[in-house]
Image: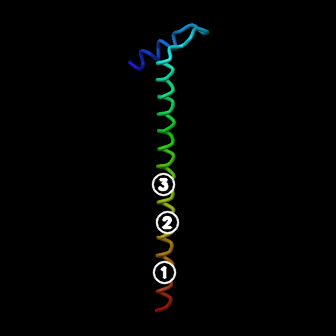
Amino acid sequence: LLNEEKHQLEAQPAGEPANEKVEEILAVEEEQAINSQTQEFLKNELLKKTLEDFEHEQIQKAHDQIKNEQEK
């Protein structure tokens, strides 16, 4: 149904008033695409932060281990 109404809008000659329902559907689809991109971006940022935290933790453990070895 969405695609059918979308095709009706795209098939209209230029200058004719567009179907409000189709414009509304297109606006919703655009918003959903933006939301999806935002979610993907935030997920990637969280993964980067998690990896950075993990790397920092591993470096700290290595430093602590070296320090302990040197104290023996």
Q: Is residue 32 above or below residue 55?
A: above
Q: Amino acid at mark 1?
A: Asp
Q: Where's residue 70, x and y in %?
A: 50, 88
Q: Nearer the viewer, residue 43 or 62?
A: 43
Q: Which residue is mark 2?
A: 55
Q: Work out which residue is located at the far bottom of the displayed protein and give it.
A: 72
Q: Earlier in the sequence, mark 2 or mark 1?
A: 2
Q: Quarter holding the N terminus?
A: top left
Q: Amino acid at mark 2?
A: Glu
Q: Secondary structure at mark 3?
A: helix
Q: Where's residue 6, x and y in %?
A: 47, 17
Give the alpha-carbon distance from disc 2 to disc 1, as whole Å.
Answer: 14 Å
Give the alpha-carbon distance from disc 1 to disc 3, as whole Å.
Answer: 27 Å
Q: Work out which residue is located at the far right of the displayed protein and give it.
A: 15
Q: Which residue is mark 3?
A: 46
Q: Residues within 10 Å of mark 3 (few under 14, many from 20)?
A: few
Residue at screen point 50% across, 33% down: 31
Q: Earlier in the sequence, mark 2 or mark 3?
A: 3
Give the alpha-carbon distance from disc 2 to disc 3, as whole Å.
Answer: 14 Å
Q: Residues within 10 Å of mark 1 (few under 14, many from 20)?
A: few
Q: Amino acid at mark 3?
A: Leu
Q: Which residue is mark 1?
A: 64
Q: Work out which residue is located at the far left of the displayed protein and give it.
A: 1
Q: Is residue 12 above or below residue 52?
A: above
71 horizontally vs 1: left or right: right
Q: Nearer the viewer, residue 59 or 16?
A: 16
Mark drawn on residue 26? none
